[in-house]
Amino acid sequence: MKRLAAILAAAVLLGAAPRAPPVALDLLLAETPAPTLDAYRLFVDAGARSPNGRVTPYGLNTPLFSDYAEKFRFVFLPPGKAAAYTAAGALDFPVGTTLVKTFAYPADFRRPGEKVRYLETRLLIRRTDGWTALAYVWNEDQTVATLKRAGTRLDVSFIDAAGRPRQFDYAVPNVNQCKECHAVAGVLQPLGPKARNLNGGFAYASGPENQLAHWSRTGMLTAAPQPAKAPRTAVWNDAAEPLEARAKAYLDANCAHCHSAQGMASNSGLFLDVEETRPAARGIGKRPVAAGRGSGGLEVSIAPGDPAASILLHRMKSTEPGVMMPELGRALVHEEGVGLIAQYIASLEPAR
């Protein structure tokens, strides 16, 4: 003990900070989750701004819309382990992998780096028996995030990018709601970190680099092709990319977790993942399987050339329970997303 104290004291005198303890892999894999986020040591600071070793930030080409929340994503891979490349679906992550996503709001989106309030940090942990989802809610002082299995609601207010004040009731999901959105063929799975959604640039501390290339170079990913030969999801709000590709990317991110052949809404016959190529399955001219009040009296999911006659757009524009889509994960209308899909539908050639 005296020798350790002497080493630490010498490090301080030399201006070198002691190395932080590693991520607590044993706690991540434990059956009983930790009551607070800091116990896992995924971050070296109390406010979860600075990731620990082997905790890498990442981004998605086109993410899910969540009431305009900013999202900070990280992935932890256990020592000596790597994800395996898959061309379709999420990467094959090893046991111990932890996907971290923090939802936050700046007080004013015109100054996004100032007065940022963290609301919750969600963990998706790969254990031996499958994936487990946990949500930790931040206190007002932004110093502790506490486990909330039953979910909760938070009052949120901010100034949006156009200078308008916004206020709404933000929902932290409960465990069952996490399972609803993340179920693939009835099994809890990650949704965002697919190779095609990671195939884009990211501003690392060492400089910008394609994420697939970075993960491969640093040993985080095995068997991946060069990024130019891998599939790629379009960036939904990049006007330089084709309109159809951006619209499909947006619907994939926001709808396909349910509306796919293996999703919760597979019985609808409406499949909005980017891999789906059949026009009718994508909703073009498709009548709904069950026409309830959610249809708004309209006849088809997508009416080519006519956004106002399209059920899909009608439900995107709603905030009414039982009508709005997605039905979980949002309380506000994504005006920019609605605009994109309206433009896409208008560009489609009507049937003759």
Image (cartoon, grey):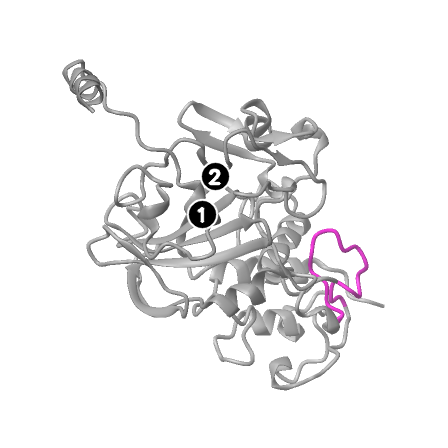
Q: Is residue 13 left or right of residue 77?
A: left
Q: Name the spot of residue 245 as percent of width and height, x first.
A: 67, 48
The majority secondary structure of the magenta stretch comes to loop
Mark 2 in CB contact with mark 1 (< 8 angstroms): yes
Which of the image's four quarters has the N terminus? top left
**Between 123 and 63, which is closer to the camera in this rendering?**
123
Residue 252 visible to an observer of this rendering? yes
Q: Is residue 210 left or right of residue 68?
A: right
**Between 289 and 187, which is closer to the camera in this rendering?**
187
Q: Which residues are magenta?
A: 269-284
Q: Residue 285 sits in which quadrant? A: bottom right
Q: Judge depth for marks 2 and 1 and give the one in front.
A: 1
Which of the image's four quarters has the C terminus? bottom right
Q: Is residue 273 magenta?
A: yes
Task: In the rendered view, tell whether residue 163 sits above or below residue 241.
Answer: below
Q: Is residue 197 magenta?
A: no
Which amino acid is tagged 1?
Leu
Instruction: List the residue tagged with mark 2.
Output: 76
Query: 10 Å neighbourhood of mark 2: few (<14), some, or many (≥20)?
Result: many
Residue at disc 1, secondary structure: helix
Query: 10 Å neighbourhood of mark 1: few (<14), some, or many (≥20)?
Result: many
Residue at disc 2, secondary structure: strand
Instruction: List the residue tagged with mark 1.
Output: 28
Q: Residue 49 sits in which quadrant? A: top left
> Residue at image x 55%, y 68%?
326
State how many labels appear.
2
Which amino acid is tagged 2?
Phe
Task: In the rendered view, tell whether residue 295 sits above or below residue 39.
Answer: below
Q: Is residue 350 left or right of residue 36?
A: right
